[in-house]
Amino acid sequence: MNNDMMRRIPRVDTIISLDRLSQIRSETGSAVMRNAVRECIDEIRRDIIEEKISEIPSDNEICAMVVRRIKGGRPRSLRRVVNATGVVIHTNLGRAPLGDILSEGLIDAVSGYCNLEYDIEEGHRSQRNLHVEELICRVTGAEAAVVVNNNASAVFLALNSIASGRRTAVSRGELVEIGGSFRVPDIMASSGAQLVEIGTTNKTKPSDYIMAVEEKGAEVLLKVHTSNFRIEGFSQTTDIEELSEVGRKYGCPVIYDLGAAFVTDREMAGMHEGGSVRKSLEEGADIVMFSGDKLMGSVQAGIIAGKKEYIDLMRNNSFMRMLRPDKLQLAVLEETLSRYLDPEEAAETVPVMKMFRAGAEQLMVEAASLKEELVSVTDGQFSFEAVYCEDVAGGGSLPGVTMKGAAVAVDSAYISVSGIERLLRKSDTPVVSRIAEGRLLLSVRTLCPGDRQRLIRAFEELNTIVKGE
Ligand SMILES: *Cc1c(COP(=O)(O)O)cnc(C)c1O
């Protein structure tokens, strides 16, 4: 613990008597004020002990904390933030933003009771999956579909239902770690599938799969989209078309863990890379699974689409009870899918689609006008410049793919760039930004409606704090 910092924490009375708090002091009375200041000082003390901070917040920052505490009641733990990082599918920031997919009709449907597992016509029990199955089939061209809580569950459920106790061939180049502790060999082991490793890290050919079936007794073929890294140079993979041919010839089901994929086609998002659920099914995959909150731009979910005989196995698997989605997930999925019925509507109204489609020139115009507004609400303590930057899809979805975007670059002679970054995170609506080449970048691609105003307010606040130092 840093004793020197502990000694420098301001006294409660010192903070209470600051001018900046005089108005709110007269509005709330001194007891409320004293309490709020004590709580803030306690929080700072805790942060020092836990080494979350390396310098004492300035008096002005402490005042801002006190005002927030008095006005805000208990702050929400899960709350809105502004994503100015240029990472569209930001896993730490909740992946896909939902925007007006959360329509009034949707909120009305889940605010009270709803027919989650109830057939209104017949007046008896029904299945929750039915609310989305037909839509998934129409959008992806699949014969049948089932939804689980997330794609990691989808992989587990598919393997457990189709490959348990059976030898399952996977390319050595696809035995990947998706993130956290989700590793393909481990998930296969826990699902009961017996891994048959084939090919090499950089090359796996159709003949390797054939050898696995003929010589090693493989009965299931699994392909995993290597979604968070790419191999360049001397490399070869077997695509789903070739793999399906092998599967058909030997009567082996072909399972494709796509993870991040566009539901219909990538051109819809204006992208030249990225897999497609519809296309993978057309090319012969028996089962495809993907995340709802990656390139699809919806809620967290694992969507499994493909042949009815396999989907039925999953539906009837007793693990389904542990992995089933909640009504909120299904409501959001239903709304998103119904927009994908008309790809043009989805391109215009699914927030991540709009973000992918935004061109560099249009973003530059937005960055330039944001820059003007930021200049107008600050007193020359910051320098702003509209610049081109590189944005990414994120969420381990399109490795190595960058999109040309635009940002407002911020610098200051009065406060360090890391100081600006830290204070932006602490504003009313926290702003998450990035630092590149010594400047702070506010990428405009990932701003949601209303975020511009939030950013401007954050800088007004920052301006007062810096001016007071
Ligand atoms: C992201 C991903 C997963 C895990 O999906 P979640 O929705 O995060 O559970 C599994 N496989 C692949 C290939 C992925 O890209």
Image (spheres, helix red, strand yellow):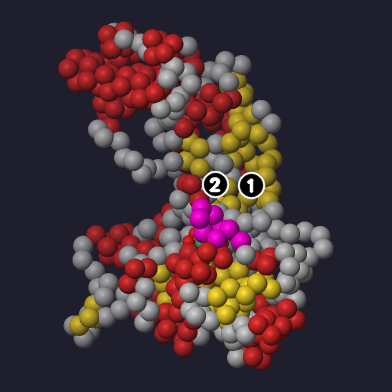
Image side of residue 23 versus residue 88, left or right: left
- Residue located 37% across and 22% down the image: 44
Q: Position of residue 417 (x, y in %)?
A: 59, 25
The secondary element bearing badge 2 is classed as: loop
Task: Report, in whole angstroms, how far the alpha carbon at label 1 lies from the one at label 2.
Answer: 9 Å
- Residue located 21% across and 62% down the image: 112
Q: Label the magenta part by its dominant secondary structure.
A: strand
Which residue is denoted by mark 2 in the rendering? 446
User: Does residue 47 sit above or below 274 in this rendering?
Assistant: above
Image side of residue 275 versus residue 157, left or right: right
| Mark count | 2
- Residue located 41% across and 69% down the image: 148
Asked whether 436 falls inside the magenta stretch, the response is no
Give yes or no for contact between labels 1 and 2 (Cβ–Cβ under 8 Å). yes
Which residue is denoted by mark 1 in the rendering? 391
Residue lying at the far right in this picture: please name it. 234
Q: Which amino acid, mark 1?
A: Asp
Residue 239 visible, this orientation: yes
Q: Position of residue 445 (x, y in %)?
A: 58, 46
Q: Which amino acid, mark 2?
A: Thr
Residue 306 visible, this orientation: no
Image side of residue 23 versus residue 192, left or right: left
Q: Nearer the viewer, residue 379 or 200?
A: 200
> Where does the magenta region start and end?
176-183
